[in-house]
Image: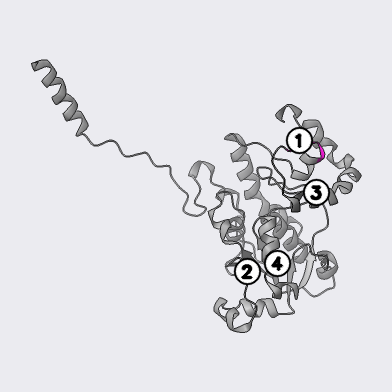
Amino acid sequence: MEDAIAVENVWADLSSIPPDPPRMRNICSRCNRPSAVCWCPFLPATRLKTHSRLVVLQHPAEERRCLRTVPMLMQSLEPGSCVIYKGKKFPTNSQELNRCGSLYEILSSQDSILLYPSKEAKDISEVVGKGLQRPRNLIVIDGTWDQARSIYYNSPMLKNLNQVKLSMGSASEYVIRTQPSEGCLSTLEAAAQALSIMEDRPSMRQELLAPLHALCSFQLLHGAVSHQSKQFLVHLDAYNKPVGKRTRKLLRQSAGEVRANKEALAPHIQHFNLDSR
């Protein structure tokens, strides 16, 4: 009996000892990433100065994403060279837009261009090529492709802007995220390519993408897998997730482009593991 009481007392004493606090990982104050996977060392040694200002219209849901690319732009460009406005749609009259500070002036200026692949969009090299006046503001929409499309169609002033697009090039280098189709780029990649053309500084693209390359490398080393686009997987009959009607329609419309670019896709096909289906 005494032994049982002694055991109970021991357990009572042990239970009264406060547990050790959880060991917190060191967090970088600049990028808010764990120090072990911080991409700040890969930022430009000196913030890049641009003649044009990058204006980001960001969907609120982007703030909740862990692997965002816009913070890389903010940390790479000189203060004031990149500004962000958040919203699901942007106001349509002067009274509402005044609440957003200078946004009304930006959206109503003839010196602003919107990077968005609409039917009216011209290739950016035709608008800001050599000998042409460089626009003051480059506007980009930050969000998923569905979110970007929603922002565009719900913000009438965006349709009044001069619209530009990037020529189809290589696949996205943001390999840890799935893109809708070949040629779709992340916000960082699109902005980096557009700015390098506008500033006539080809090296700027790689300088801006260096943190993204580091992020992807870190994630792959810690168990992430390299993603192919939905278009690519559907073409191989290797996409198992349900595809929405709108997405399926877009994929079918671009199926001809995939077939026409088999040679460009061949290196990816060789490394694709069909057993992963």
Q: Earlier in the sequence, mark 2 or mark 4?
A: 2
> Which residue is labeled 2 in the image?
89
Badge number at residue 238: 1
> Which residue is labeled 4 in the image?
152
The amino acid pointed to by label 2 is Lys
Q: Are the residues at dot 3 and dot 4 in contact (C-beta closer than 8 Å)? A: no
The amino acid pointed to by label 3 is Leu
Q: Where's residue 162, x and y in %?
A: 78, 73
Question: How far apart in space, not on screen, are marks 3 and 4 (Cα)?
Answer: 20 Å
Residue 238 magenta-drawn?
A: yes
Q: Where's residue 237, x and y in %?
A: 79, 36
Q: Residue at x 76, y 35 (%)?
A: 238
- Start and end of the magenta stretch? 235-239
The amino acid pointed to by label 4 is Tyr
Question: How far apart in space, not on screen, are marks 3 and 1 (Cα)?
Answer: 14 Å
Q: Earlier in the sequence, mark 3 or mark 1?
A: 1
Residue 194 occupies which quadrant of the picture?
bottom right
Q: Residue at x 74, y 38 (%)?
A: 239
Is 119 on the left-hand or right-hand side of 9? Answer: right
